[in-house]
Image (cartoon, helix red, strand yellow):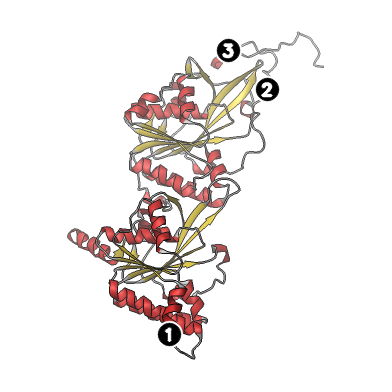
Amino acid sequence: MGGTQPDQTTALDQQRAASGIAGLDSILHGGFPREEMHLVQGASGTGKTTLALQFLLAGADTGESGLYITLAQTKRGLEAIARSHGWSLEGVTVYALSPDDIAESLAADQTVLRTADVELGELTRQLRQVIEQTQPRRVIFDSIGVIGLLAGSAPRYHREIAVLRQFLVARGCTALFLGDWPSERELESPPNTEFHSLAGSVIHLEYTAPDYGEVRRRLRVMKVRGTAFRSGYHDFRIRTGGLEVYPRVEAHQGGQYDEFRCIRSGIAALDELLGGGLELGTACLFIGPSGAGKSTLCAVYACAAARGGDAAAMFLFEERPQTLKERCRGVGIDLQPHEDSGRLAIEQLNSADISAGEFAHRVRAAVEGNRARLVVIDSLTGYFNAMGNDSANSVQLHELLNFLSGRGVLTLVVVTQEGFTSVGAIPSVDVSYLSDSLLVLRLFEVDGGIRRCVAAVKKRRGGHETTIRELSISAEGIRVGEEPLRELRHILGGVPEPPSAGQVRSSSGGVTRTVVRRDEGGSGG
């Protein structure tokens, strides 16, 4: 069995025509089926022409001749698009055919047939002629709507496309037809659906324009005849250099990591609170109001992983890397040496233009490319502000966290809760189910000052303490109280109750507590 695998892989490569877009080829399990006609549809500006050019240039790189037949653009226009991406169309034949060209070729003919019938016949004749002359392996036809307009009726349109498909397949061509189609929401009864039944595959491109920021683009493979593919929506972006497609991350791709090696923070009391530390292959939520110390503790773990020889990656939605490093340096955490060594990567994300798919792609690249074993997402609030607070993004995040767990990655996720520093409402989303561990941080008032505390509320693997300890962050470093805060109640609510009557002043756990004594025999009023 093992000896036949290379031959099977080679056979698959021979049956597929690579698109030149790594993410799309992954979705299509290798590329477009060869010697077949395919449809790429979408509204104007979704990237159909760019995709088509990448498909032809990918073939040219492997010695396959390509032909671009266009009734929608000029040759000069296509060359301008190619130059904008840094491409040359050398090795690709561009055949631009306009309605005027068809009219001129018919000017001398006398006919009693309907004009559209004559023009359609002349169009198909010229298409066959140029294909016979150039003998291409890959063909682009831009756009299919012209045939639909000239056909006039659905039956004739279906017949013309069927004949053209047979002509292309008989000559070993893999053809992409481009079509201007309505958005996915309008596809209840779209025009020219006859093409779908004839096409070997159908790919739908679309984009949405948010109230602020870059447009968000995504694609969906609607069908591929006779073979498997990855269904559903996949985000993509058009950059200089072509389309970048981000296949949706799925949990089963991660693997089955089961060693659960422990990462210790280096702060003894914090590790004791967490039952020894946090394990690889799990996810921990650091939840609390702004200023409680969530990002700082995540940086502590990132440094600890780097010191132990593991790579770490921090993804920031709300803070610049320079600000994070300077702030951490002020409390005794120096991230720069680990970044210089390559064991720590800190990346700032632009909330105005990143999609959930692109974010997952970057995280996956850090894990698979840079072998990161610890990933920090700071913060989940910024993530949902960027992606939108809907169920689809929650599910996609859940899949990403499960993927990371399967790869043996410790994922630390920062979640901001409303507090006295909040302005307006923070988007509400239940994320507790996403985590294996839950570390709650709070700000509370004591003796006219603001203090911090930390508690481990949940830990699926192994035991943990259920006590609340004081957290101190200062120029002297980061400290967690060795003793629990036993003499204060309702600390996690932010306003602890005064000590009970008759208690003495105590400094247990590092917090000084004020005592209110009653006079003996005094009234309770």
For label 3, the SS is: loop
Estimate the x, y position of residue 87 in percent, counting from the top left.
34, 53
Would you name the residue on which mark 1 appears? Answer: 108
- Residue 48 x %, y %: 44, 61
The quadrant of the image that shows the C terminus is: top right
Q: Is mark 1 on a helix, strand or loop?
A: loop
For the residues marked 1 and 2, what is the alpha-carbon distance in whole angstroms? 99 Å
The correct choice, above or below, for 122 with respect to 280 in the image is below
Which residue position is annotated with label 2? 497
* Direction top: furthest residue: 520
User: What amino acid type should be assigned to the residue bearing mark 1?
Assistant: Ala
Res 407 quadrant in image: top left
The image shows residue 519, relative to residue 416, as above or below, that is above
Residue 228 percent location from the top left of the image: 37, 65
312 with respect to 395 (left or right): left
- Residue placed most toward the observer, 136 or 166: 136
What amino acid does circle 2 point to?
Glu
What crowding class fits label 2: few (fewer than 14 Cα within 10 Å), some (14-19), or many (20 or more)?
Answer: some
Number of the label disc, if any, that sits on residue 134: none
Residue behind mark 3: 507
